Image (cartoon, rainbow, N blue to C red):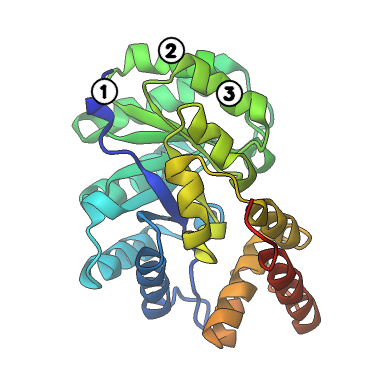
């Protein structure tokens, strides 16, 4: 697979938070406004329905509506939007993938199946192969999403090699969200012609210096401007690590939403979809103070 075939470098894609209404429905206007804010403040694109966006709780109809709303809001889905796929069954993964393809998104971010813990490499390969086969002629531009903390599935360079051999035009890269440098480095060493992305912002600058293509990350909901030099120039900034540490002292998804709510002066942004719950007001206030202190540090 040539560098040209994987398309333009992804750079800084925000794992976009999804806003919800009081009745639990996706809040399309707020979600679109957040996507536009990210793009206006340093982001290259957004990834919908990822971990930060509570994607595993968002159904097929809601996915169609959200992607349609982004397009109506002026986003170029073919250049700026990646759609997450997170499913335990082959059929559901195929259905979610087709939503993204039907809307012409830039690509897919596809997790391995979850629930059955620690499957073998053969099992993971067979699952992806089944999804790819069923997608048929639609299959294109897949980013593997390696996040064992959520899926309890390890995706290895060896599985990537097998899938690339069997489906040479399917995969454009991987997002490694292990938070472990050795894991990211393994993909950088063995599949350097692909887009190797990291999910942990603390590894971003180092990964880019060693040939990585950027990140899909949740902190881009808060400070895409701060992350951009790391994503494109491999430039270290002590504020990035300090900010991550401040955020992950609380559960990450509701913490990001609490920070968006603070920035916008809009408590509606704190809503989560069950089983995830929002931070209470005291924890949200303490979070804001920690993040403000982290961002007040001098850049490296």
Specify few, some or many for label 3: CA neighbours under 10 Å numbering under 14, 14-19, or 20 or more: some
Find residue 32 and report its horizontal and vertical position in percent: 36, 72
> What quarter of the picture does the N terminus occupy?
top left
Find residue 123 and report its horizontal and vertical position in percent: 55, 20
What separation in Å lies between label 3 and label 1 (alpha carbons)? 23 Å
What separation in Å lies between label 1 and label 2 (alpha carbons)? 13 Å
Task: Give the number of the mark in front: 2 or 3.
Answer: 3
* Residue at x 64%, y 36% (from the top left corner): 178
Q: Is residue 112 visible?
A: no
Q: Give the mark nearest the N terminus, 1 or 2.
A: 2
The image shows residue 116, relative to residue 119, as above or below, that is below
Secondary structure at badge 2 equals helix
The image shows residue 53, relative to residue 87, as above or below, that is below
The image shows residue 13, relative to residue 64, as above or below, that is above
Q: Which mark is residue 169?
A: 1
Return the residue at label 3: 185
Q: Give the mark nearest the N terminus, 3 or 1.
A: 1
Q: Is residue 263 visible?
A: yes
Return the residue at label 2: 162
């Amino acid at each position: 697979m040539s560098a040209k075939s994987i398309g333009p470098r992804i750079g800084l894609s925000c794992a976009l938070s999804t806003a919800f209404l009081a009745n639990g429905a996706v809040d399309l206007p707020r979600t679109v406004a957040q996507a536009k804010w990210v793009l206006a403040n340093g982001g290259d694109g957004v990834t919908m329905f990822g971990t930060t966006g509570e994607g595993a709780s968002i159904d097929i109809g809601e996915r169609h509506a959200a992607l349609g709303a982004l397009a109506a809001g002026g986003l170029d889905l073919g250049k700026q939007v990646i759609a997450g796929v997170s499913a335990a069954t082959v059929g559901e993964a195929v259905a979610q993938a087709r939503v993204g393809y039907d809307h012409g998104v830039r690509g897919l971010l596809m997790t391995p199946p979850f629930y059955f813990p620690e499957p073998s490499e053969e099992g993971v390969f067979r699952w992806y192969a089944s999804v790819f086969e069923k997608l048929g002629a639609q299959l294109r531009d897949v980013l593997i999403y390696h996040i064992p903390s959520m899926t309890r599935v390890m995706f290895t360079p060896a599985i990537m090699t097998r899938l690339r051999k069997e489906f040479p035009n399917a995969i454009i890269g991987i997002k490694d969200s292990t938070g472990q440098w050795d894991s990211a480095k393994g993909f950088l060493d063995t599949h350097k012609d692909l887009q190797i992305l990291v999910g942990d912002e603390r590894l971003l600058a180092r990964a880019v210096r060693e040939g990585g293509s950027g990140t899909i990350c949740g902190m881009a909901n808060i400070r895409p401007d701060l992350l951009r030099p790391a994503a494109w120039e491999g430039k270290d900034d002590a504020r990035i690590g300090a900010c991550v540490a401040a955020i992950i002292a609380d559960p990450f998804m509701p913490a990001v939403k609490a920070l968006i709510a603070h920035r916008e002066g809009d408590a509606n942004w704190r809503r989560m979809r069950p089983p995830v719950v929002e931070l209470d007001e005291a924890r949200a206030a303490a979070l804001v103070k920690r993040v403000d202190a982290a961002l007040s540090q001098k850049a490296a």
